[in-house]
Image (tube, helix red, strand yellow):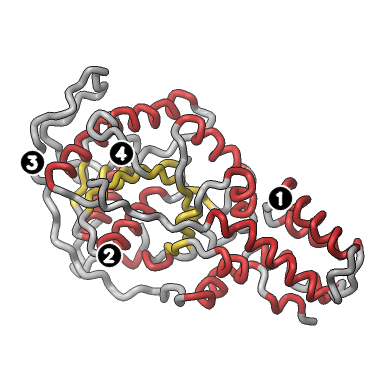
Amino acid sequence: MVSWFRRKKPDAQTPTPEAAQPPVANATPAELPADAPTSAPLLPEPEILDVAAAEPAHSEPAAAGKTGWRERLRGSAFARSFSGLFSRNPKLDDELLDEIETALLTADVGVTASTALVESLRKRMKAREFADANALLKALRADLIALLVPVAKPLQIDASKKPFVLLTIGVNGVGKTTTIGKLARRYKDEGRSLMLAAGDTFRAAAVAQLQMWGERNGVAVIAQGQNADAASVAFDALQAAKSRGVDVLIADTAGRLHTQGGLMDELAKVARVLRKLDAEAPHEVLMVIDGTTGQNAINQVRKFNEKIPVTGLVVTKLDGTAKGGVVFALAREFGIPIRYAGIGERPEDLRVFDAEAFVDALLPAELGRA
């Protein structure tokens, strides 16, 4: 849990896992039978706790526009790989192209995307399209933006789907629960009613964490005990959201390795159970990717996509040690829309993905100046 969300009361403590597991009445059995009815007794209203005002943050959120992206991503490995490259080798020659390719690979852009980008520049250089190295840099920036523009598609909440069901997936430790909390703040600020489903039942701390996000955002959280069936939690939550006319339901899931077949199969089960109440649910399958993961993110998306079609991506932790290049690799490999990018710890720092601002932060035009 991020540190700035502390309560005003000095004796307030983070709830223990045991204390953070309020029972949910009429919970569905752990294994929902295939012929389960599409309706069930309505759940009691979940308790919505009073929202305590947050203390002043220790760090300011990133500024709006390109400036904020530059502030948070300028220390990335991508920017470091290119800093000084054009001033060291200002001539248009194969050595400069080789250095560009090395920098792209070092920044996790991947072999396929890096090779395609450099070969395009090579052909244009031989055709004498570039007057100098700065012109080549400008072309590289344009090519990188063009690679990302097709996937820079904000998530649109379809108001005709009520509730709009958003299922979050991903491996362990990528920041799914934190991302849900930030999305809850975003949608609440937009005036939408919403509910959260604590489907990460493997970790008691994850349920407690989601309940704290719910408390601070004034959002109801449907939860069961530790090790409860995630599909049962999702079923209960969707049933409750429908009965209360909620606009958006965001369901958490347990982090799992993409190499664990049994756990991956449970994701498909969650989707099947949701469809017993809404044939079109989930309406968005949002996969969270850790920006520091590198090329392993490609394998993660491929395996998850085999079990449940991924309709959107969130790339988190880009403000830390992330190289950033994996975003280009994901765009080229899958073409899945990148909905959001995490460039800081504050809820405001979960940004709608902006292709131009992202490239400008990683590869500023100023790099071409000696």
Gap between marks 3 and 1 measured at Cα: 52 Å
Amino acid at pointer 1: Ala
Q: Residue furthest bottom?
A: 370
Q: Secondary structure at mark 1?
A: helix
Q: Earlier in the sequence, mark 4 or mark 2?
A: 2
Gap between marks 4 and 2 measured at Cα: 24 Å
Frontmost residue, 300 versus 358: 358
Gap between marks 3 and 4 measured at Cα: 19 Å
**Could you tell me which residue is drawn at 22 percent across and 52 percent down?**
247
Gap between marks 3 and 2 measured at Cα: 26 Å
Q: Earlier in the sequence, mark 2 or mark 1?
A: 1
Q: Residues within 10 Å of mark 1 (few under 14, many from 20)?
A: many
Residue 312 vertical position relative to residue 122 in the rendered view, above or below: above
Q: Is residue 287 left or right of residue 148?
A: left
Residue 77 quadrant: bottom right
Contact, CB < 8 Å: mark 3 with mark 1? no
Q: Which residue is mark 4?
A: 199
Q: Earlier in the sequence, mark 3 or mark 2?
A: 3
Nearest-to-viewer mark from 1 and 4:
1
Q: Residues within 10 Å of mark 4 (few under 14, many from 20)?
A: many
Q: Which residue is mark 1?
A: 113
Amino acid at pointer 3: Pro
**Could you tell me which residue is drawn at 87 percent across and 65 percent down?**
125
Q: Is residue 168 left or right of residue 320?
A: left
Q: Which residue is mark 3?
A: 44
